[in-house]
Amino acid sequence: MSKKRGKDLGRIKGFAIQFIPYSEIRDLDSSRRIRKILGIILGNNILILQGKLRAEEETRLIEDTMAMIGHVQNFKGIELAVISGNGKEGFFGKMKKGIANALAGGDLGAITIIGPATIVKEIKRNPKKIELLLNK
Amino acid sequence: MVIKIFKNFFKRIFSNIFRHKKDIKLGFYGPPNAGKTSLANRICKDFSGEEIGKVSKIPHETRSVQFKEKVEIDYKGKKMIFKMIDTPGIATKIDYEDFLKYKLKKKESKTRAKEATQGVIESIKWLDDMDIVVVVLDSTENPYNQVNITIIGNLAARKIPVLIVANKIDLKRADMKKIEAAFPEYDVVGISAKYGDNLEEFYESIFKLSKKV
């Protein structure tokens, strides 16, 4: 990621919200998924992704983000939130969800929100709602 | 063939006997300023007489992984030896300007931010090496922070036993029930690392968890 790509980060006037269906990343390997997500974020976009990343992909995203701070101009990291089930489903609920996820190739009931920290100040989350607070 | 079977049989028996002699790697994970080092310090001081690292009100005080080898915890007559591993707080964003609020100079803040980003990477790399992890959360903060969920999700994926510690229960704003509600599948122990409150329950949980290793 070059300094050039991140040159617009922090300019709140130009941000956009981009929605990506899970089908766009389903067939990508972890590296390509992360690259695609970071590419969108560096383009000054807030990404709303259908589904969620695997646990190890989330940490990989954090690692790559950290590695970019100080190397990409104005980049200070990301804000990230995932809304999915509350884990309180019973045995059959979990089984049903597991089968559905296996068939779909991912957890389509989840939503992932990722934005550059220069634009998204905070993502306030509780089990029932999510609030996106933007920087002035 | 018969010799090979006998060899494997004895190898398995001996490895089982000596497996429990190995020090258990106990990691402290969590977001910045939750009290990981404060808790690790309290344990290390109680059982080895020495602290593991420096604590500060400024976030990201721990910026590289710190160890304390051979810490023998003695709880109700039972003894276990741990390798204590205190990790830098995991965050998704680090802005050097945040450190200026703590009256650090610009250059110092920039260095701290750079080291903090490397610390986060180091923490994540160490996840695979842990036997047990204590996830330390600040009980005055919202537990539904994605960093907490990501850490716990990763530990679950790696099948590493987890204990969640709700720290700072001595503060009025502390809400341990919120942490319990956020992570219903895990044991949560409320403590105050600063004052040493409820550490008995913490040690009991650690010993219980060590049996899963």
Image (cartoon, rainbow, N blue to C red):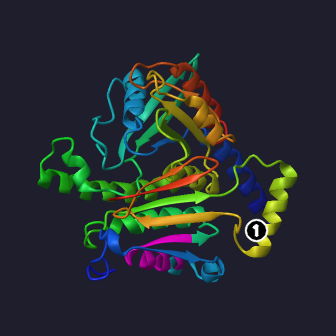
Quadrant of the drawing holding the C terminus of chain B: top right
- Judging by the rendered image, the residue that carries numbered circle 1 is A101
Residue A58 or residue A9, whichever sits in front: A9
Residue B164 position within the rendered picture, expressed as x and y whole percent measured from the top left: 56, 37
Query: In the image, is residue B14 above or below residue A26?
Result: above
Residue A48 or residue B19, whichever sits in front: A48
Residue A124 as seen in the image, left or right of residue A70: right
Residue at figure coordinates x 64%, y 83% from the top left = A27
Residue B45 position within the rendered picture, expressed as x and y whole percent measured from the top left: 36, 24
Q: Give the prevailing secondary structure in the magenta stretch.
A: helix
The amino acid marked with disc number 1 is Asn
Residue at figure coordinates x 54%, y 67% from the top left = A57
Residue A27 or residue A75, whichever sits in front: A75
Residue at figure coordinates x 59%, y 42% from the top left = B162
Q: Quadrant of residue A134?
A: bottom left
Answer whether residue B24 is visible to the viewer in this image.
Answer: no
Quadrant of the drawing holding the N terminus of chain B: bottom right
Residue A121 or residue B111, whichever sits in front: A121
Residue at figure coordinates x 58%, y 80% from the top left = A29
Circle 1 chain: A
